[in-house]
Image (tube, grey):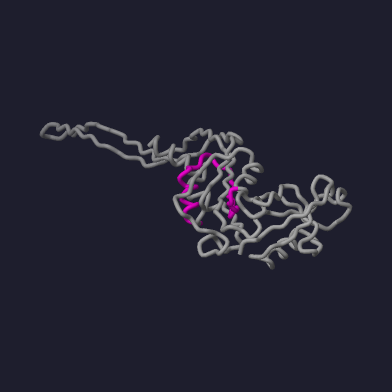
Amino acid sequence: MNNYIIVLLTLILTGCVSNPYRQYYTDHTGGMGVLNNPVFIGPQKEPSLIRGGDPLEDWKNMTRKGYLLIGQSNFNIGSANDSDAIIHARNIGADMILLYSKYSDTQSGSMPLTLPDNRITFSSGSATAFGPGGSATAFGSGYTTTYGTRTTYVPYSIRRHDYHASFWARAKPAAFGAQFDELSDAQRKQIQSNKGAAVLIVVDGSPAFQNDILDGDIIRNINGIEVTNALHCVEIIAQNRGKNISLSIYRNGETIQKEVHLRE
C-alpha cells in the first residue's frame, strides 16, 4: 500500500499523466508544420537533444548553422523525461532539441487518504438451564465484523523545476542567407534615417556569408531601391532569386557596396 501511495502522490503532484512537451507546446510554423513544408529539408535521422546554455546565444548559433525554430514548450513540473521530448520532436519533424531546466521551488503539505477500517470482535459465553430433571449448560462463541473507514494524512515534498525546450528543423538553403531585424533607435541615429534593415544573423555557407555580409550591417538599398524596413528587404530579395543584386551597406560609419549572387 505504501508504494501505491507514493506513486499516486507523484502522479498527482507532478502532473506526469501525459507528455508535457506535447501538452505545453507552442507552434511557430503558422500551423504548417515541417513535413511537406517547402521551407524545410525534413528530418533525416532521430532527433538530437542537447542541454542549452544561454538561450539567446544558442538561438544565434542554431540559426547560423541553418536551423529554424519551429516551436517551444514551457512548463513547471516535478520532473520530465528526456525521452518525452524526443518523442514529441519525432512527431513534429524536429531535428534538434535544446533543453533548459532549473529548480524553481519545493511544494510541501499533506494529502488526506481514506482507507478501510474494519474491526472484528470476538465474543463467547455460557448459559445454564435448570429443570425437574437437573440442569444443562451450553457454551457458545462468535465473531462480529464492524465496517468503517479511517482518514490519515500523508506528508509530501516535491521539488519542482521550470522546463523550456526549443525545437529546431534544418531549413533548405535560402536565397540570401541572413535574418533581418528592424532598426534600433541607436541605428537610426547612426545613419540619420528611419529607413533600412539590420542584418541580425548570417547563415554559414550562404551567399551572404560568402560575400562577407556581417551581423550588424545595415542594408540601405538593393539594386538602387531604397530599403524601407526588414520586411521590404526580404521582399526585394525574394523578387530577385537566382540573380545578382547590388547592395549598399552601412558599416562602422562607412557605406560599402557589395555584389551578391542569390540562390534560386
Residue 195, how many percent across, how many down? Answer: 83, 58
Q: Nearer the viewer, residue 178 or 150?
A: 178
**Residue sitting at 57 percent across and 46 percent down?**
165
Q: Nearer the viewer, residue 45 or 255?
A: 255
In the displayed structure, 122 sits above or below 98; it is above
In the displayed structure, 124 sits above or below 75; it is above
Residue 64, how many percent across, how many down? Answer: 62, 48
Tell me, yes or no, if residue 216 can be seen here.
yes
**Residue sitting at 56 percent across and 50 percent down?**
167
**Residue sitting at 71 percent across and 48 percent down?**
214
Residue 17, how many percent across, how many down? Answer: 47, 48
Looking at this view, name the residue that lies furthest to the left: 133
Per the rendered image, the range of residues in magenta is 65-92
Q: Nearer the viewer, residue 191 or 87?
A: 191
Residue 178 falls in which quadrant of the image?
bottom right
The answer to whether residue 24 is left or right of residue 136 is right
The answer to whether residue 259 is left or right of residue 137 is right
Tell me, yes or no, if residue 17 can be seen here.
no
Q: Nearer the viewer, residue 261 or 107?
A: 261
Image quarter in which the C terminus is found: bottom right
**Residue sitting at 25 percent across and 36 percent down?**
142
Residue 29, how many percent across, how many down? Answer: 60, 60
The answer to whether residue 95 is left or right of residue 184 is left
Image quarter in which the N terminus is found: top left
Residue 226 falls in which quadrant of the image?
bottom right
Looking at this view, name the residue that lies furthest to the bottom: 239
How many numbered marks does the figure carry? Answer: 0
